[in-house]
Amino acid sequence: MSRNKLSVRLRGELPPSEDLTRLLGVAPTVDRRRGMPSIGSGGVQTMDVWAVELAKWESVRADEQMMQQAIATLRKMIPGLTTLDRSRCHAELYMSSIRDEEWGGFDLPSDIIAAAGEAKLELIVSILVSWPSDDEEMEM
């Protein structure tokens, strides 16, 4: 099984969260600020990260209604995204896939790719393969 998540992610020196929420018309699902404790590493957050989850699914393809909602949300954000100072922040369409199987992939509709291009988003893809250890294989 795969666990996939598609988000718009901003990172760098960002305006205050309230300003971003107002500018983009959506509330963040992730809002981490420089100097806060970093998640997982025990260190300190080195940059601001603000993200909105667009879709989350557990198969190769998300259902059509979910993707249509993701596209609508992204299109709503485009005017605000195009006004951000890109010398101070990176704006990304961030695709995360955590895989439990040996091979596979994910599909994204052309409309979401077109909207990301219109918003001048970089595409970032993170794929993590969660492969069983030798002990787990022997138990099967």
Image (cartoon, rainbow, N blue to C red):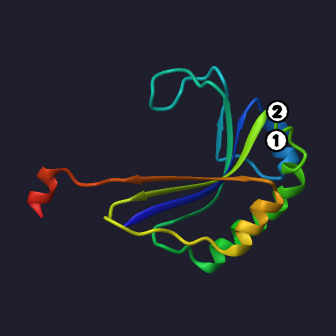
Instruction: Name the disc covering residue 20, or none.
Output: 1
- The amino acid marked with disc number 1 is Leu
- Horizontally, is 114 left or right of 124 in the view? right
- Horizontally, is 116 left or right of 45 in the view? right
Crowdedness near tag 2: few (<14), some (14–19) or many (≥20) residues, C-alpha within 10 Å: some
- The amino acid marked with disc number 2 is Pro
Give the residue displayed 82% in from the left and 41% down from the top: 20
In primary-sequence order, the first of circles 1 and 2 is: 2
What residue occupies the far bottom of the structure in this picture?
Answer: 64
Residue 66, horizontal then vertical, whole percent:
63, 72
Give the residue displayed 50% in from the left and 21% down from the top: 43
Task: Reply above or below: 86 against 47.
Answer: below
Task: Reply above or below: 30 against 109.
Answer: above
Residue 75, horizontal then vertical, whole percent:
82, 64
- Horizontally, is 132 left or right of 92 in the view? left
The local secondary structure at tag 2 comes to loop
- Horizontally, is 32 left or right of 59 in the view? right
Name the image quarter holding residue 44: top right
Residue 7, horizontal then vertical, whole percent:
64, 54
Residue 6, horizontal then vertical, whole percent:
60, 59
* Quarter of the rendering occupied by the C terminus: bottom left
Residue tagged by mark 2? 15
The local secondary structure at tag 1 comes to helix
Task: Reply above or below: 62 against 85.
Answer: below
